């Protein structure tokens, strides 16, 4: 594994980058997602996933990097602080709650998210964990379903990948 560190002197931003390749078991859904952390603590997530059904799909960091069994082995949403499920902007949320990605009518989701909770370093790093794309929209824990406060009622896991250093 090669670790790349960049120092951009013009802006004073230090970047540590990680990447994951997500895919479904049958290979129809796939894409690359990059995570970039700056010295201000925020992480920018960007990428592209193709082959998705059109519409919104829950997008989360899960506990483990075990992506066998059609993503069923990834564990629950990454939640080291034992909070309820929530939206990306909510103070009450799992560390792994990243909201929804939106696939166009041709099945392409372009991802651009900035978060100040996830981290590529420290005791609560997301490195070695998995990214999971779900079949259904995330209701941000605001729904009336029995699993809303746990999973956002996002439905089955349809693609996943392990987060590793770039």
Image (tube, grey):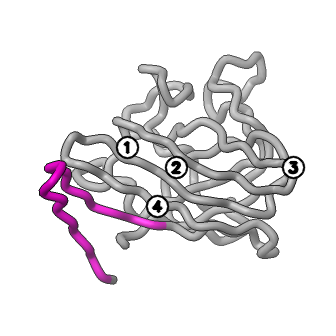
Q: CA distance from mark 4 to mark 3?
A: 23 Å
Q: CA distance from mark 4 to mark 1?
A: 13 Å
Q: Residue furthest bottom?
A: 1
Q: Please give the label number shown on residue 118.
A: 1
> Dot 2 corresponds to which residue?
61
The percent coordinates of residue 33 (x first, y second) are 53, 61
Tag 3 or tag 2, which sits nearer the N-term? 2
Q: Give whichever of 77, 24 is nearer the camera.
A: 24
Q: Residue at x 39, y 54 (%)?
A: 126
Q: As displayed, is residue 139 above or below residue 102? A: above
Mark 3 or 1: the one toward you: 3
> Dot 3 corresponds to which residue?
105
Few, some or many residues within 10 Å of mark 3 (<14, 14–19, 20+): few
Few, some or many residues within 10 Å of mark 4 (<14, 14–19, 20+): many
Tag 1 or tag 3, which sits nearer the N-term? 3
Q: As displayed, is residue 9 above or below residue 118? A: below
Secondary structure of the residue carrying numbered label 3: loop
Which region is colored magenta?
A: 2-19
Tag 4 or tag 2, which sits nearer the N-term? 4
Pointer 2 and pointer 1: residues touching (CB < 8 Å)? yes
Secondary structure of the residue carrying numbered label 2: strand
The secondary structure making up most of the magenta span is strand
Mark 4 or 1: the one toward you: 4
């Amino acid at each position: 594994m090669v670790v790349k560190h960049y120092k951009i002197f013009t802006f004073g931003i230090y970047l540590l980058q990680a990447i994951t390749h997500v895919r479904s078991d049958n290979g129809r859904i796939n894409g690359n997602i990059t995570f970039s952390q700056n010295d201000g603590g925020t992480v920018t997530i960007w990428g592209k996933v193709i082959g998705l059904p059109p519409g919104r799909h829950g997008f989360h960091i899960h506990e483990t990097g075990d992506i066998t069994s059609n993503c069923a082995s990834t564990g629950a949403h990454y939640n080291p602080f034992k909070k309820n499920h929530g939206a990306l902007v909510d103070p009450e949320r799992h560390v792994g709650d990243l909201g929804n990605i939106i696939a166009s009518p041709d099945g392409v989701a372009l991802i651009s998210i900035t978060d100040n909770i996830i981290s590529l370093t420290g005791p609560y790093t997301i490195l070695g964990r998995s990214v999971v794309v779900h079949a259904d929209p995330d209701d941000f824990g605001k729904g009336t379903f029995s699993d809303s406060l746990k999973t956002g009622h996002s439905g089955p896991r349809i693609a996943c990948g392990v987060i590793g250093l770039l």
